């Protein structure tokens, strides 16, 4: 319950700020130029610098009415920093210059004058202006360092993705080679097919985790499961016409749960290939995933002949299915007869599952 509440809170926080949090780029490296691709970058920087300057002056005017005599240069720093991080050093420098002139003319040393009254006025203004320039330089160095670090990270992610994809492909190729070597042995063929399905399940999840140059850490279930089922359908015995139909809710899950769901579907579909259509030339396997993030169910059913022994838990495959379901906190229900076999796995209500299967 607490974990679910924390996930809901996290989703609620991320939703209004998805533009920033949904990107591999952090907030500190967001570039205002990308928001206005039709305008000149220099023009965008100038306009953003003016906006930051006006915002800083407006905030100081507001605070001056609440706390009269507040420091004239105090609010210059955060807006200079904001302008530099989001609009590069040009916007930051413009904000620093305009803010300094404003504070000098309207606040120090005499309102509406650039004249110095006290011998300390000049050095005080100079030090504050130099401090603003230092903030611009420091923020620009930070911004460039962050961009370089992110570029290096993306290069490493591409390299990792490439290596992992090649490793999965190598293992899959070896399994396919073994399948060709034992084409006449049905028992070995189905065992190798199950192993190949598991490898492809991991490989497909990996491809969805690394999209472009970003490691998302989450997977869009409809996209992933449809691609996985497509791979399983293509790996069906060539002498049979077996199709897989999918109905997947619009859910986005973390990597670990998604991998388990993929392995469950692989085991269930492989079992159906092996036992449900042994005496039939064709058939249909239905894969349904419905519910919410916490209250969900997975249903895999076929229109085959049924397999009572496996349904009663008399095989390693069914024991593996139960173990995988336990990993995601789900329960397994199975029914089988001459019209086919249906597995229902999940935390969702039985009524919802029955309604879907009807």
Image (cartoon, rainbow, N blue to C red):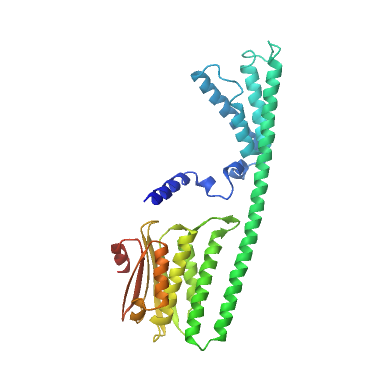
Q: Is residue 250 left or right of residue 210?
A: left
Query: For residue 52, what is the image quadrant?
Result: top right
For the point 65% across and 57% down, the residue is: 156
For the point 40% across and 78% down, the residue is: 315
Residue 44 is at least partly visible in this image: no
Where residue 287 sits: x, y (%)? 40, 69
Q: Nearer the viewer, residue 24 or 40?
A: 24
Q: Nearer the viewer, residue 13 or 282?
A: 13
Q: Nearer the viewer, residue 172 or 112?
A: 172
Q: Residue furthest left?
A: 351
Query: For residue 181, what is the image quadrant?
Result: bottom right
Question: Is residue 246 positioned above or below 35 on the image?
Answer: below
Q: Residue furthest top?
A: 117
Where residue 105 sits: x, y (%)? 64, 18
Question: Is residue 38 positioned above or below 82 on the image?
Answer: below
Question: Is residue 182 positioned above or below 67 on the image?
Answer: below
- Identify the image quadrant of the C terminus: bottom left
Where residue 269 sits: x, y (%)? 43, 74
Q: Residue furthest bottom?
A: 184
For the point 65% across and 46% down, the residue is: 147
Where residue 313 sits: x, y (%)? 36, 76
Residue 350 is at least partly visible in this image: yes
């Amino acid at each position: 319950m607490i974990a679910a509440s924390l996930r809901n809170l996290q989703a609620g926080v991320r939703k209004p700020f998805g533009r920033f949090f949904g990107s591999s780029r952090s907030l500190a490296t967001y570039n205002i130029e990308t928001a206005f691709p039709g305008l000149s970058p220099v023009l965008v920087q100038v306009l953003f610098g003016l906006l930051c300057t006006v915002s800083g002056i407006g905030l100081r005017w507001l605070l001056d009415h609440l706390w009269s005599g507040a420091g004239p240069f105090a609010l210059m720093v955060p807006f200079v920093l904001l302008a530099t991080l989001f609009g590069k050093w040009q916007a930051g420098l413009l904000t620093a210059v305009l803010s300094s002139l404003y504070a000098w003319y309207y606040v120090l040393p005499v309102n509406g004058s650039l004249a110095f009254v006290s011998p300390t006025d000049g050095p005080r203004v100079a030090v504050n202006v130099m401090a603003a320039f230092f903030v611009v330089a420091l923020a620009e160095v930070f911004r460039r360092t962050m961009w370089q670090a992110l570029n290096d990270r993306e290069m490493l992610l591409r390299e990792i993705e490439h290596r992992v994809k090649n490793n999965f492909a190598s293992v899959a190729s070896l399994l396919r080679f073994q399948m060709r070597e034992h084409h006449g042995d049905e028992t070995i063929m189905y065992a190798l097919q199950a192993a190949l399905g598991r490898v492809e399940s991991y490989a497909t999840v990996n491809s969805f985790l690394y999209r472009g140059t970003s490691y998302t850490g989450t997977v869009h279930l409809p996209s992933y499961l449809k691609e996985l089922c497509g791979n399983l359908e293509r790996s069906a015995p060539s002498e049979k016409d077996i199709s897989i139909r999918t109905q997947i809710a619009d859910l986005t899950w973390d990597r670990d749960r998604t991998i388990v769901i993929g392995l469950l579907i692989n085991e269930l579909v492989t079992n159906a290939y092996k036992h449900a259509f042994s005496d039939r030339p064709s058939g249909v396997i239905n894969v349904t995933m419905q519910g919410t993030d916490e209250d969900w169910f997975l249903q895999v059913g076929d229109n085959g002949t049924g397999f009572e022994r496996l349904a009663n838990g008399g095989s390693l495959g069914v024991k593996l299915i139960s173990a995988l379901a336990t990993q995601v906190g789900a329960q397994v229900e199975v029914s089988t007869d001459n019209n086919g076999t249906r597995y229902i796995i999940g935390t969702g209500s039985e009524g919802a599952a029955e309604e879907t299967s009807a």
